[in-house]
Amino acid sequence: MKSSRTLGLVMIAPAAVMIILFFLMPVVLTAVFSMTNMTTATGISGGVYQIAPNSLIALKSAMPEIAAEMAEPRYTIDEAGLTAVEGLGMAPGIVAELRAKHTGEVFPARRDVERMIKDLADRPSTREVKQISEQFNRSVLNTRFDSREQLFSALDSLGFKLTPEQQEIVAKTTYTGWTWTTENFSRMASSPDMARVLFNTVLYVALVLTLFNVGYALLLAIWTHYMPPMPASIFRGIWLLPRITPVVIYVLLWKWLAWDSGFISILMGKFGYLPKNYLLDTAYNAWFFVVLINGFIGASMGMLVFSSAMKAIPKSQFYASEVDGASRWQQIRYIILPQMRWPILFVTCYQTLSLLASFNEILLATNGGPGNATEVWALAAYHTALRNYAGNLEYGLGAAMALVLVVIGVTLSLLYLRVFNYGTLVAKPLIED
Amino acid sequence: MTILPTLKSLAIAAAILASSSAIALAKDVHISVWAGGTGPNDVYRLDAIEIAAQQLQREAALKGEDLKITVEKKPYSAWEDFKQALTLAAEAKTAPNIVVSGHEDIAPWSQAGLIVPIEDYVDLDSWPLSDIYENLLKIASYNGTVYGIPQDAESRPMFFWKPYMKAIGYSDADLDALPQSVQDGKYTMKNLLEDAKKMQDKGLVQPGYGFYPRTSNGPDYWQFYTSFGGTMEEGGKLVFDKAAMTRTYQFFADAVKSGVTKKNHIGMPGDQWWKEVATGKAGIWDGGTWHYARLVNQEGLKDFFGNVIFTLIPAGEGGKANTLTHPLVYLLTAGHDQEDTEIAAQLVKIASEPRTNALHAVKSAHLGISKSESTVDFYSADRWTREATERLLPHANAMPNNSDFGKYWNIMWKNLEASWTGAKTVDAAVGDAESELKSTLGDKIVIR
């Protein structure tokens, strides 16, 4: 008994590893990233401490005198520097000339000191010039320090005696990496555009789900149910085409249909209408096409599920109803629909969740336009985290947006299970008790 | 039987010795270079590095070194894909040695440690780097450090279809004087909308084709903001000028309202736009200097100067005529072997020599990066590069190198698009932009 239990654990281990790695980890990582202000500029792996002119702007208001002093780049030709240059093992004439002619000189910028070095009699190579100038650098400006300790020991050696409070401010303003924050959520809550995107998402899911994924799919299933088997199969096969066509090609076909030089424009041109981009002409048009494009893809799955469910209804029920003189509508209403409860539950639940997360068709068709009219939540999260023209990817905010989707998805799943009474569905048959 | 293993080990030892001495003599270096926004006219962004590699190998040979450089080139036609790929590759420590990207990437990429300052590897005082326009080199710097070497310069003029301008009453002399008139602020954005309307009313162009701007997000739209008196950055802090932004948004809303620009213009297929401006379907439009190459090479516009006149972006209310230069820069990425990075830097330096850079400038209709490039006959003999350099470059502004500019840009663009398409009123769009900027950037942006 014991060994079989261990064996069971061993057998389940690969599945557990897969679940943790590919299902749980992405969600956990999304949650972790969502609590950060991570962007392209902060990097993902972590930051360093750098006293740069841009960080000094922030420091200036808190401690103007120290900030001004830190802003001073200084290159001083001193004995410490000269000894260090000696250690580099270059031509001895270089150090001798530097010591004899330039000891005590202070240069405000690196290019100035390097110009002086290049003028030495034994002209060093560019690489050597850079190495020499670095030995005389008596400033922390623009140097990157991997840790707080390194930064403060460098500052200390340059004579900056900072109190712990001042150190805290300096560390905060000079850190280049990401920090923990809940700002992403407050930004989402306060942004009028986010409210609009949320509304778009609800509209998109509701329209595609009710009109196509469930409504039209049911209609197709009923139509084919009453057809002879052969045409019904052909018909179902045709309706599967949008699902099996590569999405880029499928959307491109829609674009050819709807843009300025496309089929609709050419056709309407015959009636004297000027060509226009029907796809992006107005927000209504864009929505019309977005719903159609996604609807025709999504309807096929519901159609298959509903068709097979209808096939499972005993034929005798239909024969009996025909004998009783029931019309087609009465058959649909009193025989088919009542027995379709569970397939409808499954399709509604599954399609809601997949619609919530889907955006590739919208990305390819309208890219969220016109004027962000068709920007849905998943697309907005993608735009924010992974794609924008300016190249400043906001990973933290994007993750927070993705997390909202996860929360909505989980909540909806639980709600569906409750409404459709999942407990009854999976209850043990009474006969086995 | 016993001699065989000894022979075997001797042979192996000899082989190891031979191979290691070969390594010591010959140095194989693999340099990868990626370039964003690179179409068929821009191949010299990458090819120039290959040409430079030839030169550096010859120089090494003279010094007795057997240097062999293999250059791996990767062009990206779009910007979004490129920036996503580069950022993620750099985070994963698999970035190419050299990157050609917009100068605005210097701030975020250097802060994140994805790129290293090129001034650590090259002598800026020596030719050809010492000859590069000072303002371009400044644009390639951040925090007072030179991170990149300008790969090209450009500007984004306003284009007018000459035959239609004549048809609405401009004489040849008027047209010749138009660039100066725009520069002096006598011909303004208001005149532009009026002329676009006249072209439509006369039936020269279809409704919505009078003013036919860029169809997607891009640096061009900051020119309009400058034109209406806006400032992008001041003293290291970003600036959101509400009044100027309102006028900018209003300009596009008015263009749509008066019917000279299409409400659904943004997002239209790029190929269609190119064909339309090249065949005179549009009256007035804006675009980059490199549009010349595309119009002439790919779109079949043979008599460019006979059909098109170009000017600065006219002044709007409260602003001045301007144009924007958006130099691409050669950047060195972090995380590579120090010697490889040094060779990469040398290649960038050689690729920046006037004659090599002129190949790119002339083929792609971009502008030169250095003073002596205009003295290269091949460059100055080209009418487009010569005229565009003289007339536009002195008036060119640039976007700020600020690590938060990307966020500002996204918010600005999103609301411009919304007011353009009527999804929001102009006031609502400016208000939304303001509140989002406040919550996103806090005191890093000055709102006035």
Image (spheres, rainbow, N blue to C red):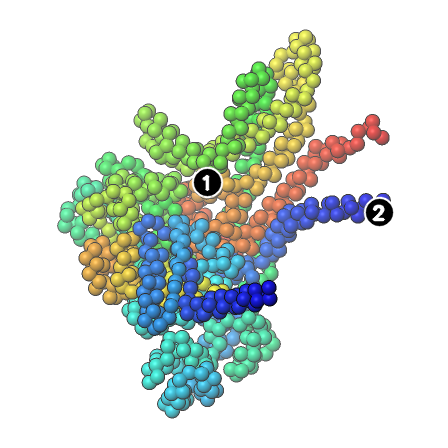
Q: Residue at x 66, y 39 (%)?
A: A413
Which amino acid does the dot numbered 2 rest on?
Lys
Badge 1: residue crowd in 10 Å (few <14, some 14–19, many ≥20): some
Residue B349 image position (x, y, % from top left) = 34, 66
Mark 2 touches mark 1? (CB < 8 Å): no
Q: Chain of mark 1?
A: A
- Is disc 1 on the same chain as disc 2? yes
Considering every residue shown, the one lying at the far front of the view is B1
Pointer 1: what residue? A364
How far apart, in angstroms, are the residues tagged by discs 2 and 1?
55 Å
In the rendered image, the vertical position of residue B174 relative to residue A121, given as above or below: above
User: Mark 1: which amino acid?
Assistant: Leu
Which element is circle 1 on?
Answer: helix
Q: Chain of mark 2?
A: A
Q: Residue at x 15, y 46 (%)?
A: B171
Residue A2 disc label: 2
- Quarter of the figure that contains the C terminus of chain A: top right
Q: Position of residue B332 (x, y in %)?
A: 42, 64
Res. B16 visible in picture = no
Note whether B159 is above or below B319 in the view shown: above
Q: Is residue A156 visible?
A: yes
Circle nearer the viewer, 2 or 1:
2
Measuring 56% from the left and 19% from the top, which residue is drawn there? A232
